[in-house]
């Protein structure tokens, strides 16, 4: 081959490589564009189902409740009950939930959720909502993650007053404000058609992913972010962050009364959120805890046994996931919980059955094995359960220590023997550590992956919960010059038995209240007859 021909050949190969490289440059995948013909204010799930029947069929599979994983499922078992079989109880539970939430509505009833399609049904049925009076005892804020109709309601009643209205006002009907305190019925809230669904995440006209959650939109703005400018991959997680997050109800003296706020201003880790809650700038100014050392600080309720102002953590899946192994790698919530599937064996769609991929080998194939193709479904399930078992063991240890902290403070407050010269200050410190220890325990407890979304954060959170609760016990013992120490030795379950049965009706009965030493500290509820069953008013 001549030198000239050789040079031409090299140039040809080089040019071809450049051409192929240019052709193979990956473009950002574009989302499909739709013109659905639906109204921009459409909130009925069934209306979306007529346009997207295959996606809607997968959404309706959220009604299925027979499949369980090792720790979770859609069967509404009681999360503290490992005595009774399913569907009432389950083997992997936390027996001290009623103790730790005593004095707060969660102590009456706290069940494993059945899924998004049951959201309205379940909240109307659960004992946390007052079924015995006109007032639910909770504001409209509790509708925020139960229905597609929140934007419509806020538009009608105003962002300034909707959130603090009585929850039961919207229980059976959407109400129109006619002014001067008068309301008229507009349309019945359908437990199926208005439950969490399509309009929460999609623009009805175009099916673009949207944020319909007021608190998430505002939390992002405070971070200098605009979801309208975010990538589709980010949105495939943010739509879940509308509800799967920690939040609190704002006090009227701090802004719009009872409006939900995400405590992300300092960051999304437990340390940063606890620091946020410790600031008096967001505290309960008008309804101070009246507990020495906690004036002006935020609290959800005061635990009746230890007199500690407590914080109730909600479901912080997003805050746990975002810097875990998958979140940090850019794997979205939808990648695992809405994997692609073939509808009718042909069309490729995202599954709208929002559930754990561990339930069946096929689900693991569709979700986990899209990336972990070198592993079997059985192997991957085993690795997840290994992490969950370790995390759950730490969770139980933190739970027991938190109960012991409450009991130590209870005994220290009642101590009549010799007291340390700094007794009052030591009890303030004990309550602060008790509050902090339970916050960290609850952060891990309320997060629904049992540690899998972020194993390192789960381990760190459990360890800190144990540390803070132990500090609370130490301060309480020191306050009594260790006079209570002998009464705190041994198995905590013998010192303070778990409260297995406790309800709003039982709190109306003094004989029931006297059955456990802790429940005697709770204020008795007035006797009343049941007034509500789901959407029906009984009397």
Image (cartoon, rainbow, N blue to C red):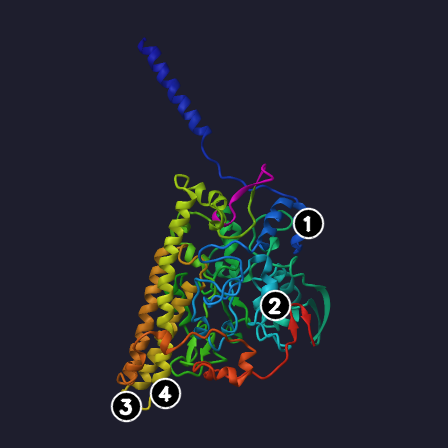
Q: CA distance from mark 1 to mark 3?
A: 74 Å
Examine the rendered structure and indicate whether residue 31 appears above or below residue 17: below
Q: Is residue 451 left or right of residue 422?
A: right
Magenta range: 336-348
Query: In the rendered image, which residue does mark 2 sit on?
Result: 124
Q: Earlier in the sequence, mark 4 or mark 1?
A: 1
Tag 2 and tag 4, C-beta contact below 8 Å = no
In front here: 7 or 393?
Answer: 393
Q: Earlier in the sequence, mark 1 or mark 3?
A: 1
Query: In the rendered image, which residue does mark 1 sit on?
Result: 38
Q: Pointer 2: residues within 10 angstroms few (<14), some, or many (20+)? A: many
Q: CA distance from mark 2 to mark 1?
A: 29 Å
Q: Quadrant of the C terminus?
A: bottom right
Residue ID at (48%, 47%): 335
- Residue 414: which numbered mark, if any? 4
Query: In the rendered image, which residue does mark 3 sit on?
Result: 418
Tag 2 and tag 1, C-beta contact below 8 Å = no
């Amino acid at each position: 081959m001549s030198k000239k021909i050789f040079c031409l050949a090299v140039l040809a190969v080089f040019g071809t490589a450049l051409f192929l490289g240019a052709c193979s440059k990956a473009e950002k995948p574009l989302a499909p564009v739709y013109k659905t013909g639906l109204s921009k204010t459409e909130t009925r799930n069934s209306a979306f189902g007529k346009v997207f029947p295959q996606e809607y069929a997968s959404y309706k599979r959220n009604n299925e409740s027979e499949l369980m994983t090792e720790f979770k499922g859609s069967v509404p078992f009681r999360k503290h009950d490992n005595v009774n079989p399913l569907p009432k109880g389950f083997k992997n539970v936390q027996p001290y939930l009623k103790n730790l939430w005593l004095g707060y509505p969660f102590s009456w009833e706290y069940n494993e959720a059945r899924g998004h399609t049951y959201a309205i049904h379940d909240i109307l049925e659960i004992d946390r909502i007052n079924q015995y009076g006109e007032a639910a005892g909770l504001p409209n804020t509790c509708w925020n993650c139960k229905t597609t109709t929140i934007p419509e309601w806020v538009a009608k009643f105003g962002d300034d007053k909707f959130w603090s209205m009585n929850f039961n006002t919207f229980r059976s009907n959407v109400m129109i404000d006619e002014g001067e305190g008068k309301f008229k019925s507009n349309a019945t809230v359908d437990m199926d058609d208005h439950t969490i669904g399509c309009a929460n995440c999609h623009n009805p006209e175009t099916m673009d992913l949207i944020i319909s959650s007021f608190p998430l939109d505002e939390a992002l703005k405070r971070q200098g972010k605009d979801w309208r400018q975010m990538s589709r991959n980010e949105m495939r997680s943010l739509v879940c962050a509308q509800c799967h997050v920690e939040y609190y109800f704002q006090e009227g003296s701090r802004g719009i009364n009872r409006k939900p706020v995400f405590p992300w201003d300092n960051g999304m880790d437990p340390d940063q959120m606890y620091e946020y809650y410790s600031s008096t700038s967001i505290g309960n100014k008008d309804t101070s805890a009246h507990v020495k050392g906690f004036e002006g600080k935020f609290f959800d309720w005061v635990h009746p046994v230890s007199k500690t102002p407590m914080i109730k953590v909600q479901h912080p899946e997003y805050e746990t996931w975002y810097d875990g192994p998958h979140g940090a790698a850019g794997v979205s919530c939808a990648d695992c919980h809405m994997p692609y599937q073939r509808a009718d064996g042909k069309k490729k769609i995202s599954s709208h059955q929002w559930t754990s991929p561990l339930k069946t080998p096929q689900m693991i194939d569709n979700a986990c094995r899209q990336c972990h193709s070198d592993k079997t479904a059985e192997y991957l399930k085993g690795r997840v359960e290994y992490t969950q078992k370790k995390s759950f063991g730490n969770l139980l240890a933190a739970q027991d220590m938190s109960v012991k902290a409450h009991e130590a403070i209870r005994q220290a407050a009642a101590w009549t023997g010799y007291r340390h010269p700094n007794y009052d200050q030591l009890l303030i410190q004990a309550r602060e550590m008790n509050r902090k220890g339970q916050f960290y325990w609850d952060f891990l407890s309320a997060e629904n992956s049992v540690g899998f979304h972020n194993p390192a954060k789960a381990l760190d959170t459990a360890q800190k919960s144990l540390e803070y609760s132990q500090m609370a016990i130490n301060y309480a013992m020191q306050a009594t010059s260790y006079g209570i120490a002998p009464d705190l030795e041994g198995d905590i379950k013998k010192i303070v038995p778990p409260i297995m049965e406790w309800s709003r009706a039982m709190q109306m009965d003094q004989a029931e209240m006297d059955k456990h030493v802790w429940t005697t500290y709770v204020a008795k509820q007035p006797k009343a007859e049941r007034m509500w069953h789901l959407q029906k008013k009984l009397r």
